[in-house]
Image (cartoon, rainbow, N blue to C red):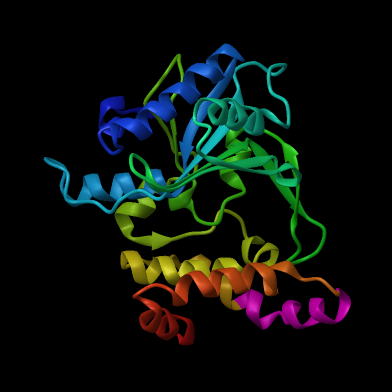
Amino acid sequence: MSLLSLPNWRDRFTPAVWAVLSTAAQIAEQHHWQVYLVGGIVRDRLLEREANPVSDPIVKPITDIDVVVDSATEASLTPSAGIELAKSIHSLYPNTRLEIHETFQTADLIWKNDPEFQSLSIDFATARTETYAYPAANPDVTTSSIFQDLYRRDFTVNALAVRLTHPHPGELLDFFDGIHDLHQRQLRILHDRSFIDDPTRMYRGARFAVRFGFEWETQTRKDLEAAIASGIYQQIRTEQTKVPALQTRLKAELKYTFESKIWQKFVAKLAD
């Protein structure tokens, strides 16, 4: 793990957004929780720093932020920690919309066309691990650690986190060599059942590849091709009436992609 200057991360946000994140960290510390920025927000910040390490380039406005709540002590974390933290922030920002998803131990705070926050969504989640009853199912979620929470993610470049709380604010967590893969411009899954568990990762990976100019890591490409060749997706359709990753989640992924300007390149990547 490495320590980066927390102001380097603060400067990525507007003062208003950073105030929300700082407040979340303060509330978490009162409960003996740890709070982390995770996923895409960390990946994008590191890519920006790499593109221009001296002075930041012009960056896109932030519209969504993922926050994970973990325990500072084994006894301090409850499955509802992320939801409780979101509720506490909501009470300070009553103009937000609060959406709670208890099954997945998450809650979203949403600003819509706000004069100060613009359109922004902050997802608060309790650190969790996932298991799949069958391929392409919705995951069964249990409370876990930040390590397990990052391990359940799609690609190593999205399994990065930055601590916002004491004793090490600004600490960068990279358990799976995600920074190496960022430098190599490659997409690598975290375990060999990744595409079996959630085949929408193939589509998401194709989108990331086009967006960032990445390529599949060699073994990841082999695992992708093996998953398709196995016939598991056709088999599961005949065995299960509900296959979320091939129905609901896939529909959402495609809708997200075809609303973007890169959809034609995305289709070409999928054809490959």
Q: Nearer the viewer, residue 135 or 104?
A: 104
* Residue at screen point 80% across, 76% down: 236
In the image, 252: left or right of 17?
A: right
Residue 225 is at least partly visible in this image: yes
Residue sitting nearer the eye, 227 or 99: 99
Q: Is residue 106 above or below residue 79?
A: below
Which residues are the magenta region?
Answer: 226-240
Image spot of residue 117 (x, y percent): 37, 41
Q: Is residue 222 visible?
A: no
Relative to 224, 111 lies left or right: left
- Which secondary structure is most common in the magenta stretch? helix
Q: Position of residue 256 (x, y in %)?
A: 49, 69
Farthest residue to the left: give it: 54
Residue 110 place in picture, x, y as percent:
51, 45
Q: Is residue 1 magenta?
A: no
Residue 5, compared with residue 197, is above or below; it is above
Q: Is residue 239 left or right of residue 148?
A: right
Q: From the viewer's side, name the closer residue of 96 and 12.
A: 96
Nearer-the-camera pick, 255 or 237: 255
Instruction: Report how many numbered discs are placed on residues in the image.
Output: 0
Q: Quadrant of the C terminus?
A: bottom left
Question: Going 57% across and 51% down the picture, which residue do you hit?
Answer: 153
User: Which residue does the image show at 73% across and 67% down from the upper left?
Assistant: 244
